[in-house]
Structure formats: structure tokens, C-alpha cells
């Protein structure tokens, strides 16, 4: 089956259903593009449209932002200038939060999506949160985190936990951080997390960060596709607590441990590898690859040697 996926640059790509892991046709792309709608898990279920069709507002202060972020109904919230948050701001369902140009910034605090459905967060710079930059929890569903710049949070940059599901994390730049992208918060939360925590990480730039890119518990399959890892401090991808992670066509540069199948006190997880590109990096760990479930959505990957140029040109703010 073929599905036409339009790109915002005006081009069109053919997305081929992946019948099992790694059977999609590979595209060699040299010009960065971005999508009008999410690829991967956030395209499944009810889909992810955010506040489309609702009211569009422009905010320039934390007070204005709070008025709309957790309001009922659909909103497209355009952020201009810096929103200085005192803590974690709750974001309700059916919202698009998008920075204008390169000016939209969130500092001092972050965003919490607690049980929220159908949320898009795009084109924002997050820095200096006293907690997380973005926290997704309590069965939040159909979330798209796209084209943001995230750094300098006290805890993590992007946490997904407590039964949340159907999420795509794409075209973001993560930097100046140790704990980066947690997926599943506790070894004791399997009853809520098994069968959920399905996330696609695609076209992200992990730039000199320390660990958790992502660090996965329970979920199967998690898709780590076409990301660029540069100068990673501890490890790239970790799979634990029986999770299944498909690490496909990424570029690892100066990363001593691209993948690990155990970390901390967690039980081991499973990893399947395909055609990753290694420069000055160690050997990725594979474990029980046959137990990693097939990717359930159509997609078309970039060839791994092109990933560095594609991602560095396209990731971060000001590209949408």
C-alpha cells in the first residue's frame, strides 16, 4: 500500500508500509524538509491536529499564555517573545503552541501535558526550566513535539511517562543537558506502561548531551529513526525492562556507547539495529532483536550517511 505524504517544502514523498522492521524504501535526501503533519505514532489513533479549526491567539506574557493553554476548546497559541514561567504550566487538550519566527521562548519553567489529548508543540526555544522542559504524563495521547530547541533544564528536557502513548518527537535540537529524553519513569510502573509509551523519535539532533536519547522502559516498539548523535557523554539509546527499541539509520558521531540494553538497576531490554552510521563511535549493542515488534505505520527513511547534513540543516527553530 502506498500513501502520499506532502511536505511543507512543496515536495511529495512516498511512504511505504513497513511490513516488519526495516523494509521501507530508503530516500537519499540532501535538502531538509519538514512535514505538515506528524509521521510515526502521532499519526495513529485519532491523529494529531492540535488546535486546528479553533481560535488563533497571539501571546507575549506568561499570564496571557496561562489564560489559553489550559482553557477548554481548540486554540492555536502563537508565542512571540519570552514567556517567563514560574513553574510547570499545564497544557490542555486540542492545542497547538507554536513560536513565531525565532522569537518564541519559554524560560524558567516548562510545559506539562497531564492526560491531554491532541497537542502540538512547535518552533519554541526552551531554556532554564527549574524542572523539565516538557513533561508528558498520565495517559496523554496523540502528542507531536516538533522543531524545538531544548536545553538547560534542572531535571530532563523531555519526559514521557505514566501510560502516555502515540507520540512523535521530530526535528528537535537537544543540547546543554545531561538527562535528555526519558521514556517510562519507573521500573515498578509496568502495569500502566506496557502496551503504551509508543514514541517515534525522528530527525532529532542530540548535540553533546549526556544520556537518555531515549532511555526506555516497557514500550515495544519504540522507533528511533534518522537521528544525529554528536559527542554523546554517557550513552545514546537505552532499552530496559523488556522494552523493544528499533534503532534505524541513525548517525552516531563521537559516541562511545551508541546503544545499551541495561542501565541503572533496571532489567535488560531488547534492541534491533539496522544500517546505523558510525563515526568515531563504539559498537552498538543488539539484544534479542527478534523480540522487537514490527513498526506499525508507513514511513520512508533517509539513508544514514545523509542524516547528519539533513538533521543539522533542518532541526531546531525557525524552520517551520
Image: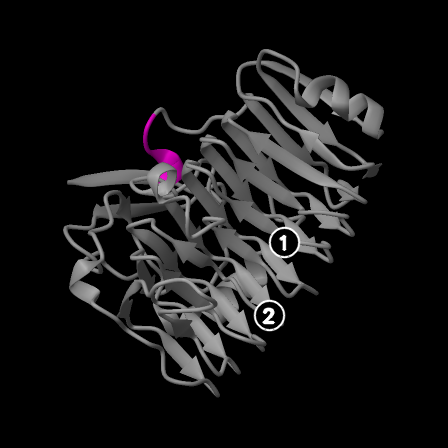
Q: Using the image as rendered, state which of residue 261 and residue 205 is in the foreground.
A: 261
Residue depicted at 29% across the width and 40% down the height: 195
Left or right of 313: which side holds 249? left
210 in magenta: no
* C-alpha distance separating marks 1 and 2: 11 Å
Instruction: Give the image location of residue 161, x and y in percent.
Output: 48, 42
Left or right of 113: which side holds 132? right
Q: Which residues are magenta?
A: 40-45
Q: Is residue 60 visible?
A: no
Q: Using the image as rendered, state which of residue 267 and residue 205 is in the foreground.
A: 267
Instruction: Give the image location of residue 155, x and y in percent.
Output: 67, 54
- Local crowd size for mark 1, using a 10 Å CA cut-off: few (<14), some (14–19), many (≥20): many
Which residue position holds label 1? Answer: 156
Quarter occupied by the N terminus: top left
Q: Using the image as rendered, state which of residue 290 and residue 315 is in the foreground.
A: 290
Q: Which colour assignment does the render follow?
A: one colour
Residue depicted at 59% across the width and 22% down the height: 92
- Local crowd size for mark 2, using a 10 Å CA cut-off: few (<14), some (14–19), many (≥20): some
Left or right of 5: which side holds 76? right
Q: Earlier in the sequence, mark 1 or mark 2?
A: 1
Identify the image quadrant of residue 86: top right
Q: Is residue 270 above or below residue 185?
A: below
Which residue position holds label 2? Answer: 210
Amino acid at each position: 500500500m502506498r500513501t502520499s505524504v506532502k511536505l511543507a517544502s512543496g515536495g511529495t514523498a512516498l511512504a511505504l508500509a513497513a511490513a516488519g522492521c526495516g523494509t521501507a524504501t530508503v530516500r537519499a535526501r540532501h535538502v531538509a524538509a519538514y512535514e505538515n503533519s506528524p509521521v510515526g505514532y502521532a499519526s495513529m489513533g485519532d491523529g494529531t491536529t492540535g488546535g486546528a479549526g479553533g481560535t488563533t491567539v497571539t501571546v507575549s506574557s506568561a499570564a496571557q499564555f496561562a489564560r489559553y493553554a489550559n482553557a477548554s476548546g481548540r486554540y492555536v497559541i502563537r508565542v512571540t517573545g519570552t514567556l517567563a514561567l514560574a513553574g510547570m504550566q499545564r497544557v490542555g487538550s486540542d492545542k497547538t503552541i507554536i513560536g513565531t519566527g525565532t522569537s518564541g521562548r519559554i524560560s524558567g519553567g516548562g510545559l506539562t501535558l497531564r492526560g491531554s489529548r491532541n497537542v502540538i508543540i512547535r518552533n519554541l526555544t526552551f531554556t532554564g526550566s527549574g524542572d523539565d522542559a516538557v513533561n508528558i504524563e498520565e495517559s496523554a495521547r496523540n502528542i507531536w513535539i516538533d522543531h524545538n530547541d531544548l536545553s538547560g533544564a534542572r531535571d530532563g528536557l523531555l519526559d514521557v511517562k505514566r501510560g502516555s502513548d502515540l507520540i512523535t518527537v521530530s526535528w528537535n535540537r537537544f543540547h546543554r543537558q545531561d538527562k535528555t529524553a526519558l521514556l517510562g519513569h519507573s521500573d515498578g510502573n509496568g502495569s500502566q506502561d506496557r502496551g503504551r509509551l509508543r514514541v517515534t523519535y525522528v530527525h532529532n539532533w542530540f548535540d553533546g548531551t549526556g544520556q537518555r536519547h531515549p532511555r526506555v522502559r516497557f514500550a515495544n516498539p519504540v522507533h528511533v529513526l534518522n537521528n544525529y548523535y554528536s559527542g554523546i557523554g554517557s550513552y545514546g539509546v537505552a532499552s530496559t525492562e523488556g522494552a523493544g527499541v528499533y534503532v534505524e539509520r541513525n548517525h552516531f558521531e563521537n559516541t562511545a556507547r551508541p546503544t545499551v540494553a541495561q542501565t541503572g538497576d533496571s532489567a535488560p531490554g531488547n534492541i534491533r539495529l539496522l544500517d546505523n552510521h558510525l563515526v568515531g563511535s563504539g559498537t552498538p549493542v543488539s539484544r534479542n532483536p527478534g523480540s522487537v515488534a514490527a513498526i506499525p505505520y508507513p514511513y520512508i527513511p533517509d539513508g544514514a550517511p545523509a542524516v547528519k547534513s539533513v538533521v543539522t540543516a533542518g532541526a531546531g527553530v525557525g524552520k517551520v
